[in-house]
Structure formats: structure tokens, C-alpha cells
Amino acid sequence: MVAPPEAADTVAPRSILFIGGTGVISAAAAERAVALGHRLTILNRGQSTRPIPDGTEVLHADVRDAAAVREVLGGREFDAVADFISYTPEQAQTSMELFRERTGQYVFISSASAYQKPPTRLPIRESTPLKNPFWQYSRDKIACEELLFRAYREDDFPLTVIRPSHTYDRTKIAMVGAWTDIHRMRNGLPVMVHGDGTSLWTLTHSKDFAKAFVGLLGRPQAVGESYTITSDEYLPWNQIYQLFARAAGVREPELVHVASDTIAAHDEELGSNLLGDRSHSVVFDNTKIKSLVPDFAATIPFADGAREIIEWHDSNPELQQVNEAYMQLSDKLTGWARQGA
């Protein structure tokens, strides 16, 4: 059992339902919610390998199967329902219909990648326009928000929208090539960094995210609002790669810069993510979430996070998967970049 956070006895217990509950973000939020004494129920298909906190009620059903969800829930209602796994308007519509009459607050997990790309000014706030012409994932999240906010305006649907940016735990390597980039560093091979490596990026540990997220559950003043939840630390990509190298025991990695457009021309999936998110500098203003959850502060620097990630992967060799396609792409594009230098 996780030790309760300080002042946990001041938090009124709430009845909370997580749809999903075992991902990077939701698992940390579940741990935090239980530690604070909330009555947590998780609804999922039961296929995740992530542990579920002791004291959590688990219900198994595919949320895409409305009849199955109604059967397992019966007539139950919750103070808050958090939906971590709706990605398209059709999925959001189904969830809204399922939980409309079951909760006083429906929390939709959107994405900070929905904010205007490229941003016309920093920092990014909740008032920043939602517009991403590069990445379908982001456009789908925007469409979900539009659907749900329309239901809030027209039918009093009790919506709260959360926009996390790049949130990680020990299982997630933030570099584009994931473990393949660590493999290349440790073997003295050049590692591809998009752009010139100077664009700014924000990385938020899931435990920090959970502090703010759980703090707004069951808050009536959050209904009808959107909130960005990120760390206040922002780093250039060059430094992010160097922190991973240091954690992996590599003193001087060879970082080779390749234009994001060039990477996109050779790998459409990577390109959508880069052009739609990672290639742009992002600095976020967390004033709004701090006004609702005043004790929220992101306290885990990414230097510590990088060490945690490498230690976890070194302790679990089966996770050290090298992507041969990415190896070949890195060899090709870093080779071209070196020749053109």
C-alpha cells in the first residue's frame, strides 16, 4: 500500500471511476487517488500488466461495448468519471451517453498537442487556439473536445477537459528512437536528433501529473473548464538526449541533427508526431490548474526521471528492444547529415 500523502486526512473521500486506469498517466493517478482515501473503481478489459493499487475495485468490460458496460455498472453513480481512452469523436460520444446520468463530473483526457502548431506565442495557456494541421491524433482530440463542450453548453453535460503534454514514467523513453537510441549511444553510434536540438520541450513525471489531476476530481468549479497539467521545467532536446546519455553511462554521445521535414519524408508516422508536436518549442503556463489545486507543484526534475528510466530498463533486459527499421533510418539520415556538414 502506498503511504498517504501529507494532509491526506483533509481530503473528503470521493467515489471515482477511471475508464482505463492502467496507462502511464492513469496508473499514477489511481495510486494517488487511493492513497488519498478516495473510493476508486477501474473499468477496463483486464489486459494490462501494470499493477492496480490495493483497495481498488476492478470491473472488466470493453468500454466500446455499451451493453457490457451497463451490465457491469448496473445503476451505480460516481462523483467523478475520468475517461483516459477516448481518442475519436465516436468514442467520446459513446462514453458521454454511457456516463451522462452517472456522474457529477466527466473528465476527458485530451492532449496539449491539440494547441496551435506552430504556436504563435509562448507560454501556451488554455486560451491558446486549438489547431494542429500536422497530426491526426491531435485533430481527433480537438474534435472530441468540440463535441463534449457543445454538450456542456447545450445540455449541461458536466465536462472537464485535461490537456497533458509529454507525461512519462519509468517505462517510457522520451527520445524518438526509444531504447534504440540508448543502444546506439552505448555502442558509439551516432544518434539522430530532430531539428537543431534547441527547441524547448516539457517532460512531466506521471507522479507529478497525478497530484494536480486527482486534486480537481469532484470539484464543481472545474466543470465547463479546461486545464493544462505539465511540469514547469522545459529543456532543449539536446539536453534531454544528453541526460539520457549520462544516465546510460555515456559521457559524450554523438548527436547528429536532422531536419524534422527530412525525417518526415522518410517515415510518415514519425513525421506526424514531430511536425505536429515535438519539433515545436512548448512552454506551458500552469497558473490555472494551480489556482484550483494550490498545492500542486511538479517536483521531479527530468535528470532524475532519466536515471529512473534507464535503471528500470537495465533491470528488465527483455524491454531493451532494438528497432531494426529505426536503426537503418538512423544510419541513413545521420550519414547524409555528416556528409553535408
Image (tube, rainbow, N blue to C red):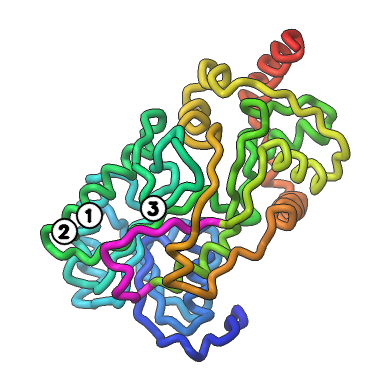
Q: CA distance from mark 2 to mark 1?
A: 6 Å
Q: Which residues are magenta?
A: 217-230
Q: Which residue occupies the foreground of this view, 284 or 77?
A: 284
Q: CA distance from mark 2 to mark 3?
A: 18 Å
Which of marks 1 and 3 precedes in the sequence? 3
Amino acid bearing label 2: Arg
Residue 197 within the segment the image draws in magenta: no
Mark drawn on residue 153: 2
Q: Position of residue 322 (x, y in %)?
A: 68, 33
Q: Does dot 3 land on a helix, a strand or a loop?
A: loop
Find out whether the residues at labels 2 and 1 contact each other: C-beta distance under 8 Å.
yes
Indicate whether 181 appears above or below 86: above
Residue 245 found in image quarter: top right
The residue singled out by tag 1 in the image is: 149
231 sits to left or right of 246: left
Specify the quadrant that holds the C terminus. Answer: top right
Mark drawn on residue 276: none
Q: Position of residue 94 (x, y in %)?
A: 21, 54
202 sits to left or right of 36: right
290 sits to left or right of 158: right
Indicate whether 145 appears above or below 270: below
